[in-house]
Image: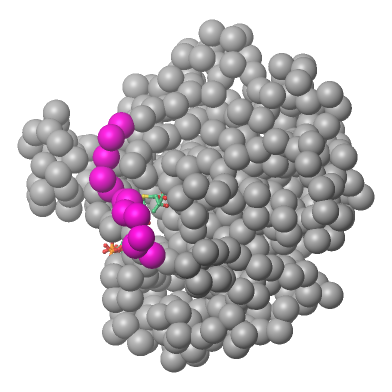
């Protein structure tokens, strides 16, 4: 049975800080953000918004667009790492908000949980819900998987340049208009790591930035190796002499903590794949230098990062590699369109990969490319750490969804914050009653109780 994504919608808060203003205030070269990281704007939540609101706003949008009633929805999963309760799942808050619109008890039949594994948990939720449909348990109902996060880092830290906020919701069914997932190919890797984590009660994560970059690439490559074996054994792809599995992915979407991480990761994967192939000789000739090897090729990530001579040479080699005509062709045709939205919005943790997918569909369609039948590969990564690689094929009904996509319209009337306004928000100095923007047909947070009996209870309203 086919199963996959029938429709996709986003909710991005309208406040943002511009890379130019941010860099000036932190004494950085704005080009480091814009060109070095691929960050132009970072979306931020207002004082009366939380991750549950971002998720509920996206769910309402997709339900209204598709004229769905709660009866049509069998499962609602929320994936996030911005959770504010250790026990009550975020999907119960989302259902509470949706029931303000659809009526109390309207979702009573609907199952679901909150899932957590840093940025990768949305991919696990998609996989589980796809299998719920494949198993024939859905009885004609849809699953909603909503990925929602606020990426907030300490003031003055290097992570502060890679913030963002927003949610993406995907409607899943057995006759998807957009993308059917390839069966029996999903592959994972997992390892106990401390590259990025957020201990209980801490609002911002503890991050080992360069370590996290490298771990991300290693983990995704391991998952790709497992994916390769699976997709070949299913017979969905047959590798000819001299081919790599990446040749069989028309599009590649990577987790995007900042848009250039997608570029970095693609270059890493392609290098590893091409190294075994006859084309590598041609590429090396174009680069004009040998591929460097670390002093201790079997060393730890720390030892490789500490090998300054290797790191410098490898950096130079990567730069030259990404300029080769063969790599440029892969980058432009498979990845570039997925990076556009990330540049304008920033890191959405769980939602970043799917914002990239949404971006790729819109901007590839605008090029006039026929997308039906194209295979999309996904490289999902979550710190801590786990990676997942899987794929799907774009379906015949995709135009119905994609022709109306317009990122700029959806971002709407954005408000560029001054650095002073940004810092006031970042330090949580604005109250719920005193947001920067007036809400427009969306949910807002009106109260978080503080008395002993009901501490932490949240109240939301839908603002007409
Ligand atoms: P940094 O170490 O300050 O930056 O912070 P850098 O020195 O690596 O510079 C970044 C790039 O800008 C480099 O390019 C520089 O060369 C370039 P690259 O070498 O990579 O090609 N650059 C310039 N370019 C033009 N003009 C200039 C200039 N100066 C430098 N003047 C870092 C970067 C990502 C480490 C930091 O922002 C950070 O810690 N971010 C948070 C962690 C993160 O995003 N990690 C990504 C991988 S882990 C992950 O994706 C999981 C995550 O999403 C969480 C989850 O799973 O839940 C984070």
Q: Quadrant of the N terminus?
A: top right
The correct choice, above or below, for 414 with respect to 185 in the image is below
- The image quadrant that residue 270 belongs to is top left
Q: Say which residue appears at 77% left-offset and 18% top-offset.
A: 136
**Quadrant hosting ligand 1:** bottom left
Determine the residue positioned at 33% across, 42% down.
Answer: 384
Quarter holding the C terminus is bottom right
Residue 311 point in image, percent of width and height:
17, 49
Residue sitting farthest toward the right? 67
Name the spot of residue 41 as percent of width and height, x first: 52, 73
At x 54% / y 84%, what residue is drawn? Answer: 431
Over which residues does the magenta segment extend?
191-203
Choose between 316 and 209: the one closer to the eye. Answer: 209
| Left or right: 190 as drawn, with respect to 83 | left
* Magenta stretch, overall SS: loop
The one nearer the camera, 280 or 457, is: 457
């Amino acid at each position: 049975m086919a199963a996959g994504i029938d429709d996709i919608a986003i909710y991005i808060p309208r406040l943002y800080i511009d890379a130019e203003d941010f860099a000036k205030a932190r004494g950085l070269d704005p080009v480091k953000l814009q060109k070095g990281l691929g960050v132009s704007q970072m979306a931020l939540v207002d004082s009366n918004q939380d991750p549950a609101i971002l998720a509920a706003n996206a769910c309402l949008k997709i339900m209204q667009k598709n004229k769905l009633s709660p009866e049509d929805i069998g499962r609602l999963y929320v994936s996030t790492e911005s959770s504010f309760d250790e026990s009550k799942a975020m999907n119960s808050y989302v259902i509470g908000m949706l029931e303000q619109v659809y009526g109390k008890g309207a979702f009573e039949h609907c199952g679901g949980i909150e899932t957590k594994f840093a940025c990768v948990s949305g991919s696990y939720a998609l996989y589980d819900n796809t299998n719920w449909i494949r198993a024939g348990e859905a009885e004609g109902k849809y699953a909603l998987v909503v990925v929602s996060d606020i990426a907030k880092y300490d003031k003055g830290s290097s992570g502060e340049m890679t913030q963002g906020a927003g949610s993406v919701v995907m409607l899943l069914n057995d006759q998807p208009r957009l993308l059917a997932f390839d069966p029996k190919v999903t592959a994972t890797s997992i390892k106990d790591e401390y590259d990025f984590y957020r201990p209980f009660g801490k609002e911002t994560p503890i991050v080992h930035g360069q370590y996290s970059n490298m771990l991300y690439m290693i983990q995704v490559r391991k998952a790709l190796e497992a994916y390769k074996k699976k997709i070949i054994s299913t017979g969905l792809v047959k590798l000819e002499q001299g081919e790599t599995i990446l040749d069989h992915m028309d599009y590649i979407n990577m987790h995007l903590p900042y848009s250039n991480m997608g570029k970095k990761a693609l270059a890493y994967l392609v290098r590893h794949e091409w190294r075994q192939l006859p084309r590598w000789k041609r590429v090396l000739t174009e680069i004009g230098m040998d591929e460097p090897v670390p002093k201790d090729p079997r060393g730890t990530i720390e030892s490789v990062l500490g090998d300054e001579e290797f790191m410098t040479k490898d950096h130079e080699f990567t730069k030259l590699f990404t300029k080769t005509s063969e790599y440029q062709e892969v980058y432009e045709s498979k990845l570039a369109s997925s990076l556009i939205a990330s540049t304008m919005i920033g890191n959405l943790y769980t939602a970043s990969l799917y914002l990239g997918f949404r971006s790729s569909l819109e901007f590839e369609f605008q090029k006039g490319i026929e997308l039906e039948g194209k295979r999309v590969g996904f490289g999902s990564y979550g710190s801590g750490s786990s990676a997942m690689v899987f794929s799907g094929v774009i379906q015949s009904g995709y135009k119905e969804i994609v022709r109306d996509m317009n990122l700029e319209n959806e971002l709407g009337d954005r408000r560029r914050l001054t650095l002073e306004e940004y810092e006031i928000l970042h330090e949580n100095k604005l109250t719920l009653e005193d947001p920067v923007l007036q809400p427009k047909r969306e949910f807002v947070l009106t109260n978080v109780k503080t008395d002993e009996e009901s501490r932490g209870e949240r109240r939301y309203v839908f603002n007409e």
